């Protein structure tokens, strides 16, 4: 089993429900179990600012799925939730990012691990640090320490 972390976010079509439902769907993936779920967080959008706030969370998984297979399964969950990719940083019904997969480093056209911008995003680092205070982001350091560098990004824990 490999420990993997998945970031979840939504800001359309009842985003709290979208994130909660997706957390339940992660638990249904084959040869995978969810071993921790963060609280839900509210964050301001980055990039395209003219959109609603996001609801975010992070899940810790133990999985036997290969990283590419897990990533494909995450994409299928997004599609089932009506995810459309109209432009970069567009509002979305659901966004699932494979953040970490063990110590793997992958740079392919489809998948980059660790997630290339996770170390710069409070909406990833806060929930990630909540469920694993010691987690390291390869090449960047401990998530909790990196969170201090994102202090200008508004994020609020809204429910456990």
Image (spheres, rainbow, N blue to C red):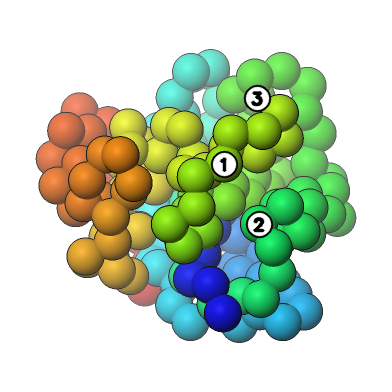
Secondary structure category for the residue under label 1: strand
Left or right? Give the position of 146 relative to 90: left
- Element under disc 2: helix
Where residue 113 sits in the image (x, y, percent)?
52, 43
Which disc is residue 90 wearing? 3
Q: Can you tell which quarter of the image residue 76 is in?
A: bottom right
Q: Secondary structure at mark 3?
A: loop
Residue 110 coordinates in the image, percent (x, y): 72, 35
* Circles 2 and 3: CB atoms closer than 8 Å: no
Relative height, residue 89 to residue 16 (above, below):
above
Q: Earlier in the sequence, mark 1 or mark 2?
A: 2
- Give me the disc on residue 67: 2
Does 159 sit left or right of 152 as displayed? right
Q: Quadrant of residue 30?
A: bottom right
Q: Residue at x 67, y 33 (%)?
A: 108
Left or right for 41, reference 110: left
**Residue 40 seen in this snapshot:** yes
Mark toward the start of the polypeptide (2 vs 3): 2
Kindly report the distance in space between the C-alpha atoms of the residues bearing marks 3 and 1: 25 Å
Q: Choose between 48 and 130: the one closer to the eye.
A: 130
Question: Which quarter of the figure has residue 34?
Answer: bottom right
Point 70% across, 69% down: residue: 65
Residue located beneath label 1 in the image: 106
Alpha-carbon span between mark 2 and mark 3: 25 Å
Specify the quadrant that holds the C terminus: bottom left
Q: Residue at x 32, y 32 (%)?
A: 120
């Amino acid at each position: 089993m490999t420990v993997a972390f998945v970031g979840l976010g939504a800001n359309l079509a009842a985003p709290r429900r979208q994130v909660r439902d997706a957390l339940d769907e992660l638990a249904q993936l084959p040869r995978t179990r969810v071993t921790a779920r963060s609280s839900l967080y509210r964050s301001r959008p980055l990039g395209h600012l003219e959109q609603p706030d996001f609801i975010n969370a992070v899940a810790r998984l133990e999985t036997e799925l290969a990283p590419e297979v897990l990533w494909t399964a995450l994409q299928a969950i997004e599609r089932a939730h009506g995810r459309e990719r109209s432009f970069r940083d567009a509002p979305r019904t659901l966004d699932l990012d494979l953040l970490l997969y063990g110590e793997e480093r992958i740079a392919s056209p489809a998948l980059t691990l660790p997630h290339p911008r996770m170390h710069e995003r409070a909406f990833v680092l806060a929930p990630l640090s909540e469920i694993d205070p010691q987690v390291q982001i390869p090449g960047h350091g401990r998530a909790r320490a990196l969170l201090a560098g994102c202090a200008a990004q508004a994020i609020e824990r809204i429910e456990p």
